[in-house]
Image (cartoon, rainbow, N blue to C red):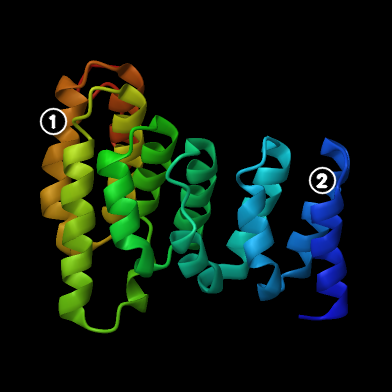
Amino acid sequence: MTTSTQNLIQAVDRADSPESLVAAVRSLAAAKDEAGIATLIAVLGYNNPVAAVAAVEGLTQLGAKAVQPLIDKLDGYNYGARAYSIRAIAAIADPLALEVLATAAATDFAPSVRRAAAKGLGNLHWQNIATPADRAAAQYQALETLLSVSQDSDWSIRYAAVVGLHGLLQLSDLQAKIQPHLIQIIESDPDSAVRARAQLALGVSADRYGRV
């Protein structure tokens, strides 16, 4: 750890007001130093949404190096911190996080966590999975999770699942499974926002199915 990064971490630890904490976190995030990951993750649990967003941005910029520490430190009690962590993990989009995102999307009690995970599942960097067989298995797991989550009772979670399915729709091998499901959503989902998002995913006009 460089002296500069150590000073930035100390500034976060010693911040004595919400404003000074935000400024310190932004400075630490801007340094893009792996040594600051643990401190940025800790900030996700503070009661300061602006600082948390800055920490998420910093962790996202650090990329794959931040994924395992984020997974290791997922907060099982503070769902707000967990939601920020999942947002960062989803934004980094490393397939290493597939299991964590799938589990969070399907089972977490906090809607904010489930939404972030569902969106992230459709946009992982699949090319980072070495073998075609492993890649196909991972994509299928993401698909099955999103198909299930898209039937949730909470419209906002169904909406997030459709966003995730839109991402997977870019994969030609999955299109035949996703397109009929999106058409079903357009024809039967009770919420107009979810139906409209499914239409956007398919790239069809609103009047084709007559239900928006």
Image x and y of residue 87, in percent: 50, 48
Viewer-nearest residue: 5 or 183: 5
Name the residue beneath numbered marker 1.
184
Q: Which residue sits at x=31%, y=61%? A: 98
- The quarter in which the N terminus is drawn is bottom right
Numbered mark located on residue 21 in the image: 2
Q: CA distance from mark 1 to mark 2?
A: 47 Å
Which corner quadrant of the image does residue 126 belong to? bottom left
Which corner quadrant of the image does residue 139 belong to? bottom left
Viewer-nearest residue: 160 or 186: 160
Residue 134 as seen in the image, left or right of residue 124: left
| Contact flag, marks 1 and 2 (Cβ < 8 Å) | no
- The quarter in which the C terminus is drawn is top left
Looking at the picture, does residue 62 appear above or below residue 50? below
Image x and y of residue 211, in percent: 24, 16
Q: Which residue sits at x=63%, y=53%? A: 42
Q: Earlier in the sequence, mark 1 or mark 2?
A: 2
Label 2: state its secondary structure.
Answer: helix
Image x and y of residue 203, in percent: 31, 40
Residue 57 as seen in the image, left or right of residue 195: right
Looking at the picture, does residue 21 appear above or below residue 189? below
